[in-house]
């Protein structure tokens, strides 16, 4: 098959407008229950669930279809312990003065601090990397395009897929993050974007009320 060859666009089912509205509403009703979790259970989660969610993330659109992402899945206790130690060291500097007071004040209603036990408790940590160079095929060394946008879309699909499987998630972004390349054995030309914590919530897990406040439609969209 040549690169410019095409196939029919026939993957979408033929829903009626009523069915489309129902399905869109059903998805919203499900995804609106997603909450960031900071209290995880250590209960195991089948690897196949994570793999299926990663495959869903891999369907995301990307610049030139280069798919410039890599998902390093950490499951071993040793690796999780190392990541927690490095992340907390960065977080201690953040809360001790690196962050502006305005930033600290913005985080206050969420009750976050520099202690991150969930980085060891949760069964999986998915470290998401953006690839500056690569391409579609193994061994490619081409310029990748719209890396940030592409990785962001893929990450959104990953979070939605994990939520649909009944798993809790948390996006964690220590700053700086270069230690993640070392821990995950990833090359220097890959940029770590975030750590996605994945698992089941602890029985006594809670959610800050502040986190439940979402902007209404009229604040997040306009019709032109």
Image: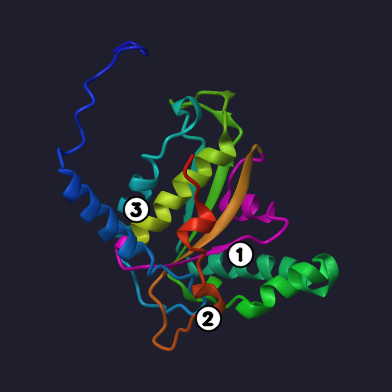
Q: Start and end of the magenta stretch? A: 164-188
Tag 2, which secondary structure?
helix
What's the CA distance linking mark 3 and mark 2?
28 Å
Name the mark nearer the viewer: 2 or 1. 2
Which residue is rendered at x = 61% and y = 49% of the image?
A: 192
Q: Nearer the viewer, residue 97 or 128?
A: 97
Tag 1, which secondary structure?
helix
Q: Residue 97 at x, y = what percent?
A: 85, 70
The residue carrying pointer 2 sits among few (fewer than 14), some (14 to 19) or many (20 or more) residues within 10 Å by Cα, namely few
Q: Is residue 10 left or right of residue 156?
A: left
Q: Residue 36 at x, y = what percent?
A: 49, 70
In the rendered image, which residue does mark 2 sit on?
A: 209
Q: Quadrant of residue 41?
A: bottom left
In the rendered image, which residue does mark 1 sit on?
A: 83
Direction bottom: furthest residue:
204
Dot 2 or dot 1: first in sequence order is 1
Dot 3 or dot 2: first in sequence order is 3
Which residue is rendered at x = 54% and y = 67% of the image?
A: 80
175 up-or-down from 85: above or below: above
């Amino acid at each position: 098959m040549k690169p410019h060859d095409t196939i029919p666009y026939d993957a979408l089912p033929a829903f009626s407008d009523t069915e489309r509205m129902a399905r869109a509403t059903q998805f919203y009703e499900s995804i609106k229950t997603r909450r960031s979790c900071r209290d995880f259970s250590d209960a195991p989660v089948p690897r196949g669930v994570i793999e299926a969610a990663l495959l869903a993330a891999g369907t995301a659109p990307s610049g030139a279809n280069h798919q410039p992402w890599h998902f390093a899945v950490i499951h071993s206790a040793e690796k999780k312990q190392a990541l927690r130690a490095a992340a907390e060291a960065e977080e201690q500097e953040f809360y001790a003065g690196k962050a502006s007071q305005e930033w600290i004040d913005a985080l206050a209603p969420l009750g976050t601090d520099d202690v991150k036990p969930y980085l060891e408790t949760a069964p999986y940590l998915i470290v998401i990397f953006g690839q500056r160079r690569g391409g579609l095929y193994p061994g490619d060394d081409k310029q990748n395009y719209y890396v940030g946008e592409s990785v962001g879309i893929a990450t959104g699909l990953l979070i939605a897929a994990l939520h649909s499987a009944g798993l809790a998630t948390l996006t964690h972004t220590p700053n700086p993050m270069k230690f993640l390349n070392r821990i995950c054995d990833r090359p220097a030309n890959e940029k770590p974007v975030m750590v996605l914590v994945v698992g089941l919530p602890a029985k006594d897990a809670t959610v800050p009320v502040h986190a439940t406040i979402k902007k209404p439609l009229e604040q997040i969209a306009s019709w032109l």
